[in-house]
Amino acid sequence: MALYGQETEKAITNFPITGVPFSRDVAYDIALVKKCAAEAHKELGTLETHIADAIVQASKELVDGMYDDQIVVDQIQGGAGTSMNMNVNEIIATRASALCGVSVHSLDHVNKSQSTNDAVPTAFKITLLKQLDKLIATYQNYHEESKCKSKEFEHVLKVGRTHLQDAVPITLGQEFGAHASAISHDIERLKHAKTALYELNIGGTAIGTGLNATKRFAEKIVTLLQKETGYPLALSSDLVYNTQYWDSIMEVSATLTILATNSIKFMNDLRLLASGPYAGIGEISFATAQKGSSIMPGKVNPVMAEMMNQIAFQVLGNHETIRMGVQASQLELNVMGPIIIKNLLESLHILAAGTTQFTVQGLRLITGNEKRCSDLLERSFALATVLCPILGYDKTAELVEKAQKENKTLKEIVIENQIMSEEEYNNLLRDPNLVRLKS
C-alpha cells in the first residue's frame, strides 16, 4: 500500500525523467528534520503531544529504512525540491496517523513552521557532512597506502622527467611520496569544506524572512539537529542570504574538482610509468586485474587507473552542472536544488567508491621494476647535471654530445676518457644528496 499521497502522485506523473528516485540519504535527513521539528514544537507547546510523538516515531522508521520503497519521486524535478519534501511529508503523515489514531496532516503538522526552501537545504547539508566524513576516511586510507608505497620504493633510483624528457635523478619513492602529500592536502581541503555547511537556514521558511516560524522554534530545532548529528550546526546570521545563495554547497563541489584534478595527474603518471612495458617506460607494473585484450594475449592494461580517470572526468562535469545550478538562483530562491543534489552526491559517491577500490586493487598491488629503472637511468644523460659542478657545463655538454654521436652511455664515455673510474662514477649514484637538498 502506498503511504504517500496526492502530491507525490502528481510528481510521479510530472517528472518521469530518469526512473531513479531522489537520494534515500537525503530522504532520511529530511525525515530527521521532520523529527526534530516535531520535538521542537512539542517542547514549545505548539503541537499536540500525541501528534508530535507519532511524527517522531514515523520519522524514525523512515530513517531506519522501513519505507525505502515509498521514496519514489524522480531525482530530477521542478519546484526546488517540493516534490521530495512532500514525498517525505506524506509518508510520515500517513504512518503517524495510523500510530496515533487521528488524522495527521502532511503540511499543518509534519511541515509545521517549515517550507521546502529551508527543510530541504538543511537536510542536504547534513547529508553532505556525512558523505564528506566518509570520503575523508577513504582518503585517509588512501594516504596511508601511498606513504607505504613511498617507503617501499625509497631506494629505487630512476630518471626524473620534465617536458616528458629525461631530466635529473629521483627515486620512485619520491614520486609516490609527492602524491601522498597531495592527498594530505586534499584531506585538509575536505575538512575545510565541511565548515561552510554548518550554517543552516531552517526557520527562515520560504525566503528567509521567517514568516510562519518563530525564533524560538528555529533555535530549538537547530539545537536538536546538533544533538542528533554531532555536528556544530548553527542558525545562519542571515537567513535571507542562506536561502538565496548555495555558495557553501558549491564550495564542496569545487573542492572535489581539486581532488579530481590531482587524481588525473597521478593516474596519468602511473599509466606513463607502466607504459610498454617492454617498448615503453615500464618502470612500474600494475597487477593483472583482468584480461587486457580480447585479441592480444598477455596484455595487462592499467584498468584501475583508467577507472579513476573516468571518475575524475565525471566529477569535473558534475561540477559544471552544479556551478550552473548555483548561478541560476534568481531573486529570493534557488529552484535548481534537485540537480545540484543529484550531481554532488554522485560525485561524492563515485570518488569514495573508486578511491577505495583503487587503493586496494590498484595502488597496493603496484610493483616497482628496479632493474628497469636502473637500466634507463644508466642509458640516460640524467647524471650530466651531477657532473656539471665537477667538470663544468661546457665540458659536460661536450661529453653528452660525444656519447650521443657514438651511441654510448655517459658512463662509458667518462670512463673511456679516463675522467673518472667506474667506482668514482658509481659513487655519484650513491650520494644521498643526489635526490635531496644538501644540509
Image: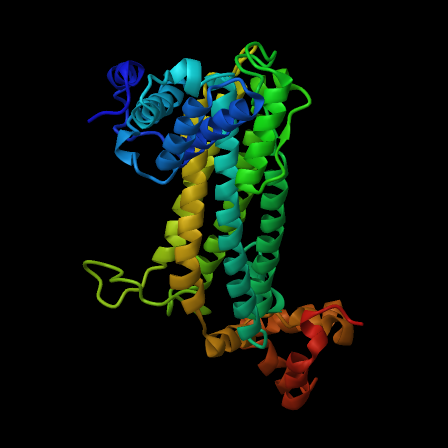
Residue 286 occupies quadrant: bottom left
Question: Residue, x 65% and y 90% (percent of image)?
Answer: 423
Judge left or right: residue 203 versus residue 15: right
Residue 322, image x, y percentages: 48, 28
Q: Please determine whether, in this image, residue 327 is positioned above or below residue 131.
A: above
Residue 8, image x, y percentages: 30, 18
Q: Nearer the viewer, residue 43 or 324?
A: 43
Residue found at the very far right of the displayed protein = 439
Judge left or right: residue 88 versus residue 6: right
Q: Nearer the viewer, residue 428 or 140?
A: 140
Q: Is residue 281 visible?
A: no
Q: Please determine whether, in this image, residue 346 is positioned above or below residue 356.
A: above
Q: Please determine whether, in this image, residue 393 is positioned above or below residue 429.
A: above
Question: Residue, x 41% and y 22% (percent of image)?
Answer: 51
Question: Residue, x 46% and y 54% (percent of image)?
Answer: 267
Q: Nearer the viewer, residue 396 or 137?
A: 137
The N terminus sits in image quarter: top left
How was the colour assigned to the protein in this rendering? rainbow
Q: Please determine whether, in this image, residue 67 is positioned above or below residue 100.
A: below
Q: Is residue 399 visible?
A: yes
Judge left or right: residue 356 versus residue 2: right
Residue 11 occupies quadrant: top left
The C terminus sits in image quarter: bottom right
